[in-house]
Image: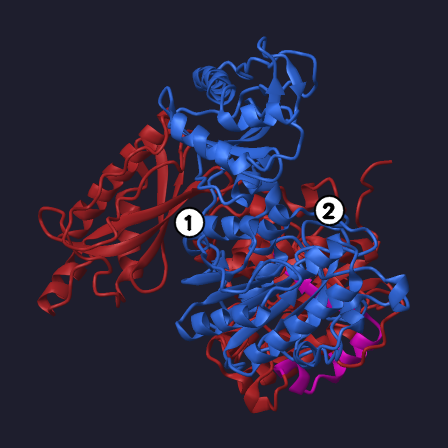
Chain colours: A blue, B red
Amino acid sequence: MFKVILIVGDGVADRPVRELGGKTPLEIAVKPNIDELSKRAVLGVWDPISPGVRPGSDTSHLSLFGYDPRRYYSGRGPFEALGVGADIRPGDIALRGNFATVNDELVVLDRRAGRTLPENRELVKYLNEGIGVVNDFEVKFYSATEHRVAVVIRGTTVSADVSDTDPHEVGVKVLKSTPLSNNENAVKTADVLNKLTLMTYKLLKDHPLNNVRVERGLPPANIVLLRGAGKMAYIPKLQEREDIVLGKCLAVSATAMIKGICKLIGFEVITPPGATGGVDTNIMSKAEEVLRAYRDGYEFIYLHVKGTDAASHDGNFKAKVKVIEELDKAVGHLTNNIDLESTVVVITSDHATPTSVRDHTGDPVPVLIYSPELIGDGISNFNELSARSGSLCRLRGTDLMYVTLDYANRVRKFGA
Amino acid sequence: MFKVILIVGDGVADRPVRELGGKTPLEIAVKPNIDELSKRAVLGVWDPISPGVRPGSDTSHLSLFGYDPRRYYSGRGPFEALGVGADIRPGDIALRGNFATVNDELVVLDRRAGRTLPENRELVKYLNEGIGVVNDFEVKFYSATEHRVAVVIRGTTVSADVSDTDPHEVGVKVLKSTPLSNNENAVKTADVLNKLTLMTYKLLKDHPLNNVRVERGLPPANIVLLRGAGKMAYIPKLQEREDIVLGKCLAVSATAMIKGICKLIGFEVITPPGATGGVDTNIMSKAEEVLRAYRDGYEFIYLHVKGTDAASHDGNFKAKVKVIEELDKAVGHLTNNIDLESTVVVITSDHATPTSVRDHTGDPVPVLIYSPELIGDGISNFNELSARSGSLCRLRGTDLMYVTLDYANRVRKFGA
């Protein structure tokens, strides 16, 4: 069995950029180390979900690691909670929440409490200190961007089959959550959501930070509106799966959502110093962590670089080229320090984020698989165009994980 | 509609072999007849299940014949029974069994009765004569390798939802089978398994062959432990399927498992003299059977050659090359004696068995489809590498059967 190093440039796949003469950042970037590996590897394109489907970072990463998102993705509630670093476990429910402004009759005046809310973290802390448990359910709030929070509810009888307390419009009263199925657990959970919503109001309405906001003419963040309850599905860890053979796995990433998913499925997770998730991230320090784990006997090591995606969302193709060139140096450091006779190396993108679109698209992404037991395609430049003629042809969804592990001799036989 | 001849070199697909200068046995073998057909055929690669998934012989053959194994594969019990030539029908359950050694309190002393058990066939015959029926279920034992047996249980109320009597360890008592669901049939079947287990003990404990074993200091084979109950799924025969048009089908093979699967789905099955399933098999005598059936109006003829797989499991790439060269002569004999203007010929592998791995892998395998109605790719050497650039690109699972039958004009319209 070989070790595996999987390297993802988040959103690195692009479309032709007019300002780059109709070339993509991957075509323009000077990346001798990736291209050298490319010559010895097999190439192809990969549809992270299936052709044309636009992936989120969550669904694409489930797929990347061999978990069909159509089976394992349990909605935005649980995965946004993962994305803010929440401790969420199979069976928990999670909801998305807004700090909002209501009047004394609980009529919603502003669903976002002005949207800009620097007090978010402090108010969340106050709520967690003041609540903690409702009936026999554990409740925990997590701070997110602007006015947003995530709420995780844990209990043996908790149900996601409950309606929102968020009315999704202003000028009407906060809604009562109701059970969406004829189920005792749903009845209990709706009751908890209603109590919880009132508790947030009672705790927040006279909070000193809100008094200051009112004095400044800002809408107070005096309630949390809840929506989109979802239950975290049971997901077997990589090490528990019956179709593959994996031991210790490490993910090197600076992105909360990715770290959350990786932890959930059995990776140890590390963010080295200088790894920021931005375009200025220190990729070399991530490569060092990969090498340390490689020497420590880790069998599957995931290196995630977010800077390419960050640059793409800003439409900044120049910064994207620069991050690719930094990534290339890190790849060179890796390939110079691992045993290529006993290691499978994969380089790909979790989805395309064309700088022209500034968001994820459903385009296929290029993929490169190096294995000591494979004759390479001899393609000496790794990019969206060259990968089209690679011998892997077009893989989709969970295929990529299985193909990778097959070439590492880590797939169990289906049948006899 | 054209006739179809499907030729499979079992496990013939390989990875580059260091000792062959980094080439595969298919690349090295002198095979002018296959290569001549290759020029006129379309080539591609095929993933027997899906990319990277390691197939067993059973699952890959279901897929090869257009039956999705994720739907039709009912576990090792029924398919191992097929593999020892058992008469097993949809609705039957089958279990894997071990001759084992227990003491008077039914404590397991040796789960394999010493493993080497030349008395296997005679003891199985004795059990079948002594048992036959338990309650209203028919029970039949089949001899397998060493200490192993297969047991097929038939009855209108039989259930596979029962636990093992095999404790899977020594020093503990034989287990009582219990129903795994709250179902009357499961209760009845567990009861039958418990009675059956005791019956094997009563019949075997004083059997003369066991007395001889004890005298020689060998552990007596005085009970059969049962595990892995599975119910044989209903599988429509090729001739009954509503998506394809096929009449008489013949499979030429010397391998019990393959013959069992072929019989199950509507093939007549023949093993000609000299066909052994080993590297010394007489492939030409198989080709003669193919030609006889071809002249007799058979519409789909399957030629299975096991020798390539046998050589691969031994890591013997030289023997593998030799079997390929023998297969090539048989292919020449076929193409010289059939009407290529009205016949589709397919050559492929049911899975890769790299000689370096000595077991099946999930690698894609090369495939060649000759049809009189197709312009070929002009690829003059049929192997793993050349097939990558063929126009079939990458097929998966049941695709290959449909593509084959489509070029033989034997697929029914889906829709109107």
Q: Position of residue A355 (x, y in %)?
A: 80, 56
* Viewer-closest of B25 and A220: A220
Q: Position of residue A323 (x, y in %)?
A: 69, 67
Residue bearing the label numbered 2: A54
Quadrant where the image shows the C terminus of chain B: top right
| Residue A279 visible in rendering | yes
**Crowd around label 2: few <14 · some 14–19 · many ≥20 (10 Å):** many
Q: Which mark is residue B77?
A: 1
Chain holding disc 1: B
Front one among B264 and B29 = B29
Q: Is residue A24 above or below residue A77?
A: below
Residue type beneath disc 2: Arg
- Which of the numbered marks, if any, corresponds to residue B358? none
State which region is magenta: B24-49
Q: Tell me residue B285's x, y (percent).
A: 62, 74
**In the image, residue B32 lies in the stretch drawn in magenta:** yes
Q: Secondary structure at mark 2?
A: loop
Residue placed at 73% from the left, 60% from the top? A365
- Quarter of the rendering containing residue B338: bottom right
Q: Is residue A351 found inside the magenta-colored segment of the image?
A: no
**Is disc 1 placed on a helix, strand or loop?**
helix
